[in-house]
Amino acid sequence: MGWWQINADTLAASRFVLSPFAETFAALKLLHSAAAAHPGERAWLDARLPGYRARLAADPVTARLVRAGLGKDWIADFLTPTPKDGETFEETVARVRAADPGAARAHLTVSLAGPLPAVLDRDDLPERAAALLEHVWTEAVRPDWDRRRRVLEADVVARTAQVSQGGWAAALDSLRPGRTRWLGDSRLQVNPHEYPPREISGAELLFVPVTPKGGWVSWEEPGRYALVYSCAGALTDPGTRPVPAGLGALLGSARATVLFLLDSPLSTTQLVAVTGQGLGSVGRHLKVLLDAGLVERRRAGRSVLYSRSALGEAVLNAPLRGAGNCATSPHSPAVSNGTTHRR
């Protein structure tokens, strides 16, 4: 397995950051695979795949570049610079465009695990990659970036609360189930592949959420490492796990959805973002649930966070008459992984 050696100070100083570039690259991966993880992602793909495929059909060199760069086990390094806190999409894609052409070709031989095809033996690969990423950002991500950002912020709040409640080990185990895992002895597994361990103590360590399924790790030696991971499924598409029909009949569909989502602490604003309900409606649902003892609230900095109480858990999991489950997802379907990268 691939793992990083991390001392306590490095882990304590690590932080979650948002990256519009990482979100765009994750969207590119999703467009390339065309494999949706949930119905919302399927609708997003159906709307955007025709334009993406037409773009590549008109530019076969870039199409071949994408296939080569998104290797089976390794992403070509120059395609995904390690995120920086607060960096805009334009600033990051400029780093792709500025990549050394010779280095880009060398990175592609690694992601291909073989020789570079003659069609890619050229100096304009960084420019082509940057132009395609700009297309994906403009056409497929930027139109709903504000909503995506709120979903990403909601995930960060939930992960931060998980750290405070269960410690870093629990939070790291849940980032990419089956891939990331706290191994003890200051070791973080970052993927299941048999790669040499890396000592990163003293480096800047970033955790970067994206809404599409998937993720990757990257680093720019010696000082910055990042682990990109997918948001919790209930945030990207509440319909991924259906709300029990009986609970919807008892509380009402919209209120049951709010209770259902509160397995991790969320603010009113974040609930608005992930449910698509209005601020006033979410506020009224929370007041009813709070008065009934089904949710709890606590202050975290300037935010008030809501989560299910023990009674709320019992109600959610109780067998209710009116058999069957129904997906109550009012969420918009628009949401829907030197630098080195491992899937």
Image (cartoon, rainbow, N blue to C red):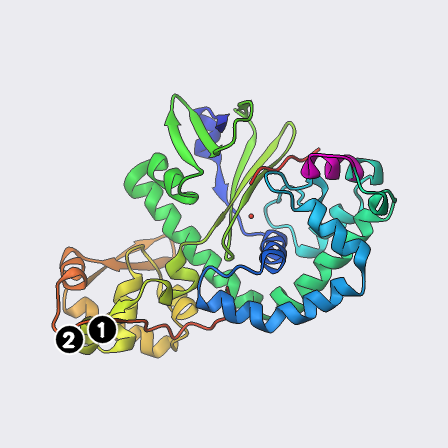
The residue carrying mark 1 is: 245
Res. 173 image quadrant: top left
Q: Are marks 1 and 2 in contact (CB under 8 Å)?
A: yes
In the rendered image, residue 278 lying in the magenta stretch gets the answer no
On residue 62, which mark appears? Answer: none
Residue 91, can we see it?
A: yes
- Marks 1 and 2, how far apart in space? 7 Å
Residue type beneath disc 1: Ala
Q: Position of residue 93 (x, y in %)?
A: 72, 52
Query: Which residues make up the magenta segment?
Result: 105-115
Q: Tag 2, which secondary structure?
A: loop
Crowd band around label 1 with a 10 angstrom C-alpha radius: few (<14), some (14–19), many (20+): many
Note whether 138 is above or below 85 in the view shown: below
Residue positioned 48% across, 71% down in the render: 333
Q: Which residue is mark 2?
A: 322
Say whether disc 1 or disc 2 marks the residue closer to the N-terminus: 1
Image position of 127 (left or right of 234): right
Q: Residues within 10 Å of mark 2 (few under 14, many from 20)?
A: few
Residue 117 position, x and y percent, is: 81, 42
Q: Is residue 109 left or right of residue 17?
A: right
Position of residue 287 relative to residue 19, above or below, is below
**Residue 309: percent from the left, percent from the top?**
18, 57
